[in-house]
Amino acid sequence: MNKQSEPTIHDIARELKISASTVSRALNDNPRISLKTKEKIKAVADSLGYRPNTLASNLRNKKSNTIGIVVPLINRHFFSSVISGAEDVAFKAGYNVVISQSNDLAAKEIKIVQSMFSNRVDGLIISIAMQTSTFEHLKIFKKKNIPLVFFDRVIPEIETDKIVVDDFAGGFRVTQHLIDQGYKRIAHLAGLQDLTIYSNRKNGYIEALRKNGIHYDESLVIISSLTSEEGVTAVKQLMKLPNPPDAIFCGNDTTALSAMIYLRDMGIRIPQDFGIVGFSNEPFSKVVSPSISTIAQPGFQMGQKAAELIIREIETKERNPQTIVLPTELIIRESSSRKGSQ
Amino acid sequence: MNKQSEPTIHDIARELKISASTVSRALNDNPRISLKTKEKIKAVADSLGYRPNTLASNLRNKKSNTIGIVVPLINRHFFSSVISGAEDVAFKAGYNVVISQSNDLAAKEIKIVQSMFSNRVDGLIISIAMQTSTFEHLKIFKKKNIPLVFFDRVIPEIETDKIVVDDFAGGFRVTQHLIDQGYKRIAHLAGLQDLTIYSNRKNGYIEALRKNGIHYDESLVIISSLTSEEGVTAVKQLMKLPNPPDAIFCGNDTTALSAMIYLRDMGIRIPQDFGIVGFSNEPFSKVVSPSISTIAQPGFQMGQKAAELIIREIETKERNPQTIVLPTELIIRESSSRKGSQ
DNA sequence: AATATAAATGCAATCGATTGCGCATTTGCA
DNA sequence: TGCAAATGCGCAATCGATTGCATTTATATT
């Protein structure tokens, strides 16, 4: 009983005693078919409840009208924002979006990417898994000349389009802001340094210190994978220093929050005694109290840009790999505002 | 230069001077092909960098190995959790997942659903748009016998699988909890009542009052679409009553938060003077202070269940529409805990 | 009216993989 | 050794839509 009889253009053709070619052309508004015939055909198509079989069309046209998106975890605010933005643009342009999550596992990522290739996606948008360290599975796309866009976590090994936020400027701005607010010893909870995003943030931090003539003290920088727990561990470690910091630039909002809660429980007042700034503008950073200053990453826009870029490449077949750096925005909230204003 | 020469089974066949049928069978591990031949074929396939063209296979098999998911907004914690759960299960079972968001617009939803049908998804998982009030576009799936699973926002008009959380029990439990904590006049910010989820929550609230012998006062129930602003408006209205409430059961966490902030700013202490409970367990509800008591909705699990259900139906062709009610969990946090414990 | 030209439609191959049926070769057993 | 059964593989049709080229039909021109 299943799918036995989806009407096809041949059914329409038979009904009207014409050829399937004509039906196909009519439904595609080909000028070679007379208006009268087109109308007849469309009427029959409607009455039969005809729905074009995109699979067949895709096979013939060697085009799937589908864009693949691969992220580490769908269920993460930043990534779902990117997906949302990309879907938005893609849908308007007539593309479907297939999504998979790597769970930050290289093995799964490889499977996913191969599957997407087999499904002949017209382009692939990907933020690679943390774990991923070989890139053969992605080079296929390059080799076959299928548009490939990296975002967020990018790698230098493959020359293709990349969309990133200006992490360096973000790190710089955060640090400068803390300096401006009068904090004297500014620590940094950095992320794993093999990921460009984190090393850039750290470099921005260092540069801001340098520009302000502040000595860069390595003991104030702690590198971790920035989980909530590691945030606490790091702060504990920092506060035990002979000369502890009075502010922290945290590599993400999660550690900013856990650090803040820890410090508060220790009786340290924020922002009066201690300044904290996070990164990413997670939804919660706005609503906790004190609210957390942070850097907004335009996830939705990144998704839009990525989709626009990839669709242009799909349709023009032009390839000139570019790296788009989206601006970051410093959002000043309570956790770092001790000088009047705000 | 594009896609001109993806190797096919015919290329492999030619290389080995055998037929494409044999190649196809070999690659699918058909027992009719000898081991020796299979090995030769697989070797050549590898050396040619052959990747099966899923489109062709799908067309021939009349099966896309794809599940469609439609949500109002991808970029919302609950929905992205569902998607994440569904992708998880689907991927393991060898299915792709295409996703679209309706933005709560009926028109877009209709387009999406039709497009998914044209793409011959093997099944559709959907949470309908608020705005949607006709269901013809969904009935197609029923008529064609393509598995259809509703979740979260379901409609009685179509007899198909539904996955919901026990909103009634949730509303009941929240209210009972507030009563247990000694709050006397409990208000309710309800969502639009044409959505089952909201009317069920309200009914649970009413039932809990009844069971405890508390008079149900309609002036304590305010219906809105539960935006942040409407939360504030509602609370203002409630507090102006001659006999204002001392607790609110909010239809979602967003209004719980905005109400809480408003009340706090009015100098009302939470939870001592006033109790608040939300619904949905948005990530922020745990980290704001005071943290917000709420009802956890197992989004990830819903997605998993939905995918499991739909895959079973796809593969067995059995259809016996069922409604799965997932349990809700009351998470007691600070905003409603005035009696010791916690 | 006859021919030239334009307009409308049809034929058949194609996209790449799958599969029922049949032929050929090998193996098994008496 | 002889014949049946088993094994291994190929032919050709199929899935549904598209399209270059051919053919038919209608319109225009002289």
Image (tube, coloured by chain):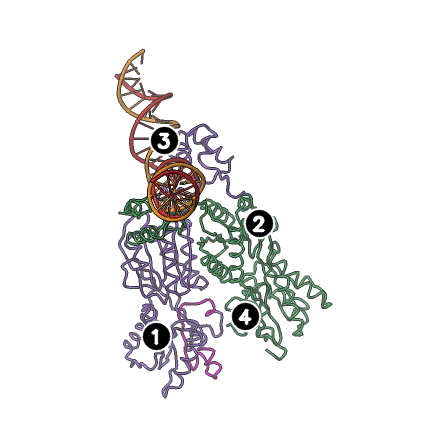
Chain colours: A green, B purple, C red, D orange
User: Which residue was labeled with disc 4?
Assistant: A261
Instruction: Say which amino acid is labelled 1.
Output: Thr
Q: CA gap, disc 1 to disc 3? A: 66 Å
Q: Reply yes or no: does residue B268 show up in magenta.
A: yes
Picture quarter with the C terminus of chain A: bottom right
Judging by the rendered image, the residue that carries numbered circle 2 is A319
Q: Chain of mark 2?
A: A
Region of the chain picked out in magenta, as a range: B259-286
Verify CB contact (< 8 Å) between mark 1 and mark 3. no
Whether discs 4 and 3 lie on one chain: the answer is no
Residues B184 and A157: in front is A157
Residue at the outermost right position: A213
Residue count near mark 3 (Cα–Cα under 10 Å), binned few <14, some 14–19, many ≥20: few
Secondary structure of the residue carrying tag 1 is helix
The circle drawn on residue B32 is 3
Residue depicted at 39% across the width and 57% down the height: B69
Query: Does residue A166 appear left or right of residue A315 in this picture?
Result: right
Name above or below for residue B61 compared with residue B334.
above
